[in-house]
Amino acid sequence: MPPRARVNMADVARRAGVSMATASRALSDHPHVAAGTRARVLAAAEQLSYVISPEASRLAGGVTGRVAVVVPHISRWFFATLLDGLEQVLREGGLDVLLYHVGDAADRRDFFQRLPARRKVDAVVVLGMPVHDAERDRLELMGVHIVAAGGQVENYPYVSIDDAAAGRQAVDHLIFLGHRRIGMIAAIDPAEPGWPVLPGRTLAYRAALADAGLPAGPELVVTVPWGGLSGADAMARLLSLREPPTAVYAHSDEVALGAMRTLRRAGLRIPEDMSVVGIDDHPMAELADLTTVAQPVLEQGVLAGRMLLELLAGGSGTDGATVPTRLVVRGSTAPPRR
C-alpha cells in the first residue's frame, strides 16, 4: 500500500476497478452511480485511508462548487426568506453561494455587462425579478444552469405561486362575506413597473368581481409603489370617495398594514367599518390580526435549491413548480354593516 500522503483518486479508482470519473462521482455521492459501484469505491477508499479533498473533487469534475444568486432587494422580508431557504439546501449539497445584489438600474446594468460570475459558478439563481431579452442573452453566454425563484421567469425553470389564484382567494373571501363595493390597492415595483405584463393579482380582482356581477369602477382601484406608506396613502384616497368601499383588497400585506394605519387614524374600526385583506402572510400580519393569503416563501427557496441540485446532477429537471397558497382568516375581515 502506498503511503497515505501519496494516496490519490487514481489509487482509489485502480483499487476499485473503475475510472477516475466514476470514483469521483461515487465519493461525492453523485446520484447516478450504481449502489454496488459506490460500495466498491468507498471500500477501496477506506482500505487506502483516502480522505477526499472537496476542492480537488470539484476541479476533477470540472465544476467550481459555487452558485451565483442575483437578488434585487436583500432588505425586504420576501427576498431574505427566499434566500434563506435556497442557501440552506445549497449548503447541504456542498455548494457555496455568491450573492449579487442588483439594487438599482446602475447595479443591474453593471452586473449583466461585466457578468462577474462568469466561469466562477456552476449555476445562477434569479430571485423575484424578470430577466430581459438582452440580459438573458448575456446570461446564456455562461453556459450554466439558470433557475428562477419567487416569480415566473420565461425560458427558465422556476418556482413560484399562482398570483391569480392567490388574488381570487382574497377577493372571493370578501365577496363571500357579503361585500359588494370592494376596492383594490395595487402595488408595483418602481424598478420594474411593467412586470409582470398582466399582473395576476390585478386580473384576479377583475375576474372575481365580473363573476359576481359587481361593479369594478376605476375609482375603486389605486396603484402605488410597493410598501406600507404607499398603502396608507392609497387608503386615504379610497376614503375620500363619495362612496368609499366597504372592503379593500391589497396586493401585499405590507400595503394592507399601511391601509390599516390610515383607517385607525381616521377613527374607523376594522373590520366593523372596513374589511382589509392582503397577500403573503408577512411576519407582521399575525401580530396585526390581518386576514391574508399565505404563500410559502421559505419553501419556494428550498424547492428552487432542490431543482438546481437535480439539474447539476444531470437530471432533466422541470419547466416550473407552482406552490399552493391558502386563505388565513383573522380579525380584519367580517360581513359589512347593515
Image: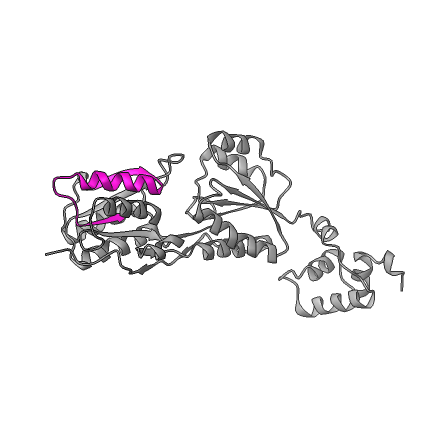
* Residue 285 placement (x, y as % from top left): 35, 54
Residue 136 seen in the figure: yes
Residue 251 seen in the figure: no
Q: Is residue 139 left or right of residue 121?
A: left
Q: In this view, does 134 lie to the left or right of 62?
A: left
Q: Nearer the viewer, residue 209 or 252?
A: 252
Vertical placement of residue 299 versus 187, above or below: below
Asked if the magenta segment contains residue 246, the reply would be: yes
Quadrant that contains the N terminus: bottom right
In the image, what residue occupies the spot 21% across and 45% down? 183
* Residue 84 placement (x, y as % from top left): 52, 52
Q: Nearer the viewer, residue 13 or 325?
A: 325
Asked if the magenta segment contains residue 202, the reply would be: no
Q: What's the magenta region?
A: 221-249
Task: Give the image quarter of residue 286.
Answer: bottom left
Q: In this view, does 274 lie to the left or right of 131?
A: left
In the image, what residue occupies the spot 34% across and 43% down? 228
